[in-house]
Image (cartoon, grey):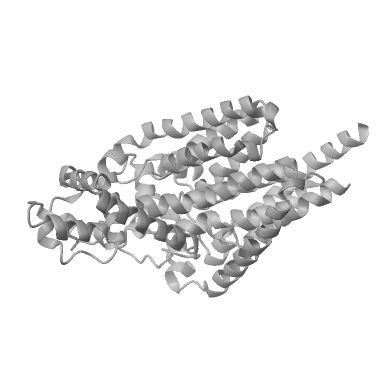
Amino acid sequence: MDEAIKTEVSNSNLVYPAIIISVLLLLIPAFYNHYPLVNPDTATYLASGFKPETPFDRPITYGLLARLFSLNGLSLWLVVFMQAFIVASLIFRITRWVVGGTYYFTGMCIVLFLSACTSLSWVVSQVQPDVFTSIAFLCIVLLLLNKEKGKMEVLLYVLFFLSVAVHLSHPILFAGTLLCLFFLKRFFVDKGLYRQTNNWIAILMALSLASILIMGTAISKSKHVFFMGSLLEKGVLKKYLDDKCPTENYRLCAYKDSLPSSANDFWWSNSSPLYKVGDWKGTKVTFNDIIHNILFTPKYLKLYLTATAKQTLEQACAFNIGDGNVAFPTGSNVNQRVAEYFPREINWFNKSRQNMTILPLTIPNAVLFYVVLISLVIMFFVFAKWQRMAKEMKLVLVILLSGIIMNCMDCAAFGIVNGRYGCKMIWLLPFCIILYLLTPVKKAK
């Protein structure tokens, strides 16, 4: 017992330096860029937090977190630092409960590998809410492991709630995943913990649905437009308009033969039919009517489900690093927001590699591709040894793999296929493999 106490004290003394080193490892892309990475959506998030007001197309949560983390505009570096600190801390805690041993050293090695060979560091280094999708799943793992107690347990619930509340797609994603975990719990939960696990899942489900209260206004104003863009990219909207326009008087019929080729053009291009038939607000009634007819007509519902299944597979293969990390010169929305809210850093931002040249992403994406491919191959052997696997490892696998799959389905069903959407979650696959490979070492001692 004395030896166990000494080991725990040693771990607690070394874990914080190890986390700080891990934070720096996770921010390598930002250091290479000479500034945190940004995306076209960064402008909206910053404006929402500093005005503050809820945008019509996304919740205000991440904007407020960015303002809080940056100490009210002191530096965007603090935002990505906090994101890295949260991720590193969660990885260390999962490593502690699943692998054990000198978890501070093991956790640091895991972060080093994930930072160098996966998409994690690129997601963490961006001023974007993408990182919070995986953060929420890590919180679920820790809460269902039933190891964290007291203040830490409460903190994990709060962090989970905030993570869900940063993006419009999250309530459906996490409600769906938690429902799956409810039915799959027999694969990773001891029978004696069934009732407690049901309670934990119920709390997480309630928090997921409660997040809608924060984003209710944005959902009401934008869901019909986002879903119409998804239907357009699936080819369902064009088919519906071809069939119905001879008898229906939709204003959109005038543009059915000149619809944009992509949902992004439909949503954001100034020449999009969206802005010719009533913009985001004026199209709500008509678009909702079209959506209702498509989803409740077997012919079109079949087309929608078939296209969704196809795009789910496409999204599973789309996880490229760097989507949207283009240059934002003076006059662009992102540049204006950085200049307005972080005036001390605008010169730094303008001289970043992202704004001065094209980021070299070929090698990172190639490494990521092969790491994911190797992880998939190993995963077949992992499941072959399911019966001999530790229950903690089973829990990690079921939760994180369910999250990766559900994320692909969520993007395909309600949005579009996008490399950024896969990039934010795919690092969890090699993370699972690493934990599995390390766990037997613990069991053998």
Find residue 65 and report its horizontal and vertical position in percent: 46, 41
Find residue 39 and report its horizontal and vertical position in percent: 41, 59
- Count all numbered tags in the image, as a single digit: 0
| 155 in relation to 25, above or below | above
Query: Is residue 22 in sight in this rendering?
Result: yes
Q: Which quadrant of the rendered structure holds the N terminus?
A: top right
Find residue 32 and report its horizontal and vertical position in percent: 56, 66
**Residue at image coords 46%, 54%:** 408
Find residue 313 and report its horizontal and vertical position in percent: 46, 60
| 144 in relation to 167, above or below | above
| 235 in relation to 23, above or below | below
Query: 337 or 238: nearer the eye?
Result: 238
**Residue at image coords 66%, 58%:** 379
**Residue at image coords 48%, 37%:** 162
53 on left or right of 196: left
Query: Is residue 36 in sight in this rendering?
Result: no
Query: 10 or 439: nearer the eye?
Result: 439
Query: 333 or 115: nearer the eye?
Result: 115
**Residue at image coords 31%, 62%:** 332
Residue 24 in which image quadrant? bottom right
80 on left or right of 92: left
| 60 in relation to 300, above or below | above
Judged from this view, the residue extending furthest toward the front is 298
